Amino acid sequence: MIRDIRERTFEFAVMTIRFSESLPSTTNSAIVIKQLVRSSSSIGANVEEASAASSKADFAYKMGIALREGRETLYWLRIIRAVYSVTVSNIDPLISEADQITRILGAIVSSARGKRKRLGSMFSFFLFHFSFFIFH
């Protein structure tokens, strides 16, 4: 099944927000939850921004931000798994999806930066925009 990375990151943010609502309400957990929700939703927001990039460099930059937010999200999910009594069946699918999204974004950023240096054509710019499609 082919899914657009924009849709996949949107769905991931929704899943993460729903998951965060199941966590305990303490002062410390509120801080972690806020960071998790912020970073996980920022992945998709930056992918959306990249899809409307004004240049190849802008595209690579915004996708790079999405990649960094994905890595941060993985960090917060690992913190939650280590600190809170969360069942593996609830958090491991989120960690797996965050890892997959981060790998996809890493490949897109690498491709965008590498091809931008080698190819100066508009073809490569459009190729980056359509490289959002992945197999899941």
Image (cartoon, rainbow, N blue to C red):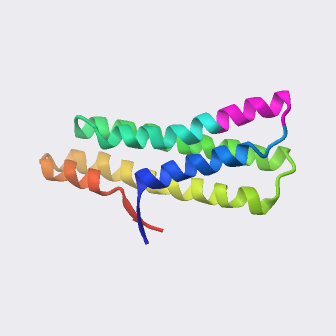
Tell me what residue is drawn at x 21 percent, y 48 percent.
Answer: 125
Query: Could you tell me if residue 102 is visible in this image?
Result: no
Relative to 18, residue 131 above or below: below
| 54 relative position to 5: left or right | left
Q: Position of residue 57 (x, y in %)?
A: 27, 37
Q: Is residue 131 left or right of residue 90?
A: left
Q: Residue at x 73, y 55 (%)?
A: 91
Is residue 131 found inside the magenta-colored segment of the image? no
Q: Is 28 colored magenta in this rendering?
A: yes
Horizontal and vertical percent position of residue 9: 49, 50
User: Closest to the observer: 129 or 21?
Assistant: 21
Left or right? Give the position of 15 relative to 118: right
Which corner quadrant of the image does residue 73 belong to?
Answer: top right
Going by the picture, which residue comes out furthest to the left? 121
* Image coords of residue 90 (percent x, y): 75, 58
Q: Quadrant of the N terminus?
A: bottom left
Seen at 37% across and 52% down, the residue is 108
Q: Position of residue 10 (x, y in %)?
A: 50, 48
Toward which corner of the image does residue 36 lie, by quadrant?
top right
Identify the residue at image location x=28%, y=37%.
53
> Image quarter for residue 21?
top right
Between residue 122 and residue 21, name the one nearer to us: 21
**What is the chief secondary structure element of the magenta stretch?**
helix
Which region shows up in magenta?
25-36
Q: How many marks?
A: 0
Residue 108: tell me if it is visible: yes
